[in-house]
Image (spheres, rainbow, N blue to C red):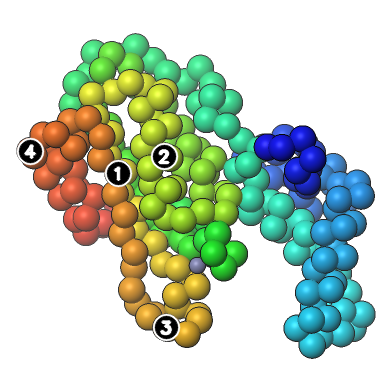
Amino acid sequence: MAADAPRPLHTARLDAHGDSFDDNGAATDIGGDRYLEFENLVRRQLELLGEEPERAGLAKTPSRVAKSLTWLTRGYQMDVADVVGDAVFAEEHHSMVMVRDIELYSMCEHHMLPFFGKAHIAYIPNGTIVGLSKLPRIVEVFSRRLQVQERLTEQIAAAIEDVLHPLGVGVVIEAYHLCMMMRGVEKQNSTTITSALRGAFRDDAKTRDEFLRLAHGPSKPLR
Ligand SMILES: [Zn+2]
């Protein structure tokens, strides 16, 4: 980032639950002048939309929007090394490890509207495994930013490759994009599916087929 680039709003490192934020307007530490600037921009945005920012229902909206957008993009302040911590373990297991149906919420960088769906992640260990709960956390690091689904899918695969140096990684994301569903085209039920396949998942047809069959198979609740 260039030295004179605007400093982002986030000044504090946020935990995964976004506890620095409080929808009731309690004190937060994301603040300072830039936070006020953000509120003013939202107020102006309301005016440009033909609204009256001072009316009762909207009075606190600029503050809420500034907080929620900051929270929804908190991934900028997270990194994979922090999230994974020391949860990498030596293990001689050479079969596919897969976590399916990881909830995913992101925002498209073209319209700043949400897209949401599920990620399915698998890897084949090469001497180390990662705590299973860390896979959804890695998804958070990259999904809680302005994104395109294609890049998000690749970034998750690259991160797992960096952490584990596995024999292969596969990531499939299926998502609904509000910018498609709510705007002109109104393709209400279309999902966008992206995949990133590396190592054995790309080179070995049997592994790839097994992964894609598991990823695209029907999900049924265990309970
Ligand atoms: Zn979009």
CA neighbours of label 3 inside 10 A, class few (<14), some (14 to 19), many (20+): few
Residue 156 disc label: 2
First along the sequence among labels 1 and 4: 1
Q: Quadrant of residue 83?
A: top right
Under mark 3, the amino acid is Val
First along the sequence among labels 1 and 3: 3
- Alpha-carbon span between mark 1 and mark 3: 27 Å
- Alpha-carbon span between mark 4 and mark 3: 38 Å
First along the sequence among labels 2 and 3: 2
Q: Which residue is mark 1?
A: 196
Under mark 2, the amino acid is Ile
The mark total stands at: 4
Q: Nearer the viewer, mark 4 or mark 3?
A: 3
Name the element at disc 3: loop
Image quadrant occupied by the N terminus: top right
- Alpha-carbon span between mark 1 and mark 4: 16 Å
- Alpha-carbon span between mark 4 and mark 2: 22 Å
Q: Position of residue 126 (x, y in %)?
A: 26, 17
Under mark 4, the amino acid is Lys
The residue drawn where x is 48% and y is 37% is 138
The residue drawn where x is 45% and y is 68% is 177
First along the sequence among labels 4 and 2: 2
Q: Which residue is mark 4?
A: 206
- Alpha-carbon span between mark 2 and mark 3: 29 Å
Q: Nearer the viewer, mark 1 or mark 4?
A: 1
